[in-house]
Amino acid sequence: MKKKWGFLTICLLLTTMMLAACGQNNNNSGAGASTNTGSGNASTAPAESAGNTTGDSSGGKLILGTSADYPPFEFHIKGSDGNDQIVGIDIDIANEIAKDMGKELEIKDMQFSSLLNELSSGRVDLVISGLSPKPERAKQVDLSNIYYQAEQSIVVPESSQDKYATMESLEGKTIGVQTGSIQEDIGKGIKGAKLTSLAKISDIIMQLKSGRVDAAIIETPVAESYLKKVEGLAITSAKPTTEEDGYVIGVKKGNGDLMTKVNATLDRLKQAGKIDQFVTDANEIADQQSN
Ligand code: ARG
C-alpha cells in the first residue's frame, strides 16, 4: 500500500511537471518560449527589445534564455505568492549580471535545443542554462569564462544499478538524453546504443520510470537533484567522459561589450565565493520542493 502511494505520488509529480511544461508552451512566442520576469510575473517582451537593450549601461531589460528543467541550475517552483517562478543557480547569476548592468531581468523558458538559435537571432540577450562549451557552439555564439564544473552520470532503474556499472555495459542499449545536449554526443559515442532524445529532463526521467529506456545520461548535480524526488532510480558507477564539463554563458556573436560585463560579474561572484553560496541555496530550495 505504502509503495503504491509512493508510485502514485511520483506519477502525480511528473504529470504536474508535464502540465506545467504544456501550460508554458501555450504562451509561446516562438521556439517554445514562455516569458517570466525575475519577480515571477509572466509577460511577453517584444522580440526587438532583446539585443538592442544590452549596449546601454543602464535601463531596459536583459533577456535571459534558459531551459528550466534543470535543478539546481534552473527550475520551476511555486513562489510564496502561489505563482510559478523560475529559480536556481543560473538565475541567481543572471540577476547579478542584470543588477551590475542596471537592467531588469526577464526570463524566457524554452527548449534547450532552441536556445542558441534564439541567441544568435537576437531574441534573447544571453543564455545561462548549464551550457557546456563545445567547439561547434563557440562558432555560433560567444562563450564566457567557465563558472561551474559539472560531471556526467548514468541514471538507471535501481534494479539495474549493478548491471550498468561500466560504459561498455551500455553498448546496444536504449539511452535517454536531452535533445541538443552534450549528453546526446556522449550517447552517440556508445557502440550500438539506440538514443531516445527528448526535450526535457523530466521526460527522460519518465521514460526511465516506465522502462522505455534502459539508462539515461544526465549531468551529476541535476541527476542527484531529480533522484531526491523520484524513487526507484539510481546513479551507477559508470563514468561518461567529455572534455566539455564546464558551464559557460552564451552571448550573441560579436557582442563584446556584453561579454566583458558578463565575465566581470562572474569574476566578482567567484572571488566572493557567491557561486558556491548560490549552489547551496538552490539545492535547499529544490529539496524543499520535494514531497
Ligand atoms: N551541459 C549540457 C550541454 O550543454 C546540458 C545542459 C542542459 N541544460 C538545461 N538547462 N536543460 O549540452
Image (cartoon, helix red, strand yellow):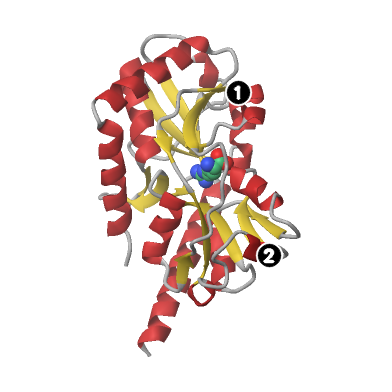
Determine which residue is flagged by label 1: 141
- Identify the disc placed on residue 174: 2
Q: Quadrant of the C terminus?
A: bottom left
Compare residues 101 and 89 and report the one nearer the observer: 89
Across and down, in percent, residue 81 comes to 27, 49
Foreground: 80 or 167?
A: 167
Find out if the beta carbon at label 2 lies less than 8 Å from the nearest ligand 1 atom.
Answer: no
Residue plotted at (44% across, 13% down): 260
Q: Residue at x 59, y 22 (%)?
A: 122
Relative to 92, residue 215 above or below: below
Amino acid type, label 1: Val
Three-letter code, disc 2: Thr
Q: CA distance from mark 1 to mark 2?
A: 32 Å
Q: Residue extending furthest right?
A: 192
Quarter assignment of residue 271:
top left
Q: Residue at x 47, y 69 (%)?
A: 233
Left or right: 122, with 236 as reference point: right
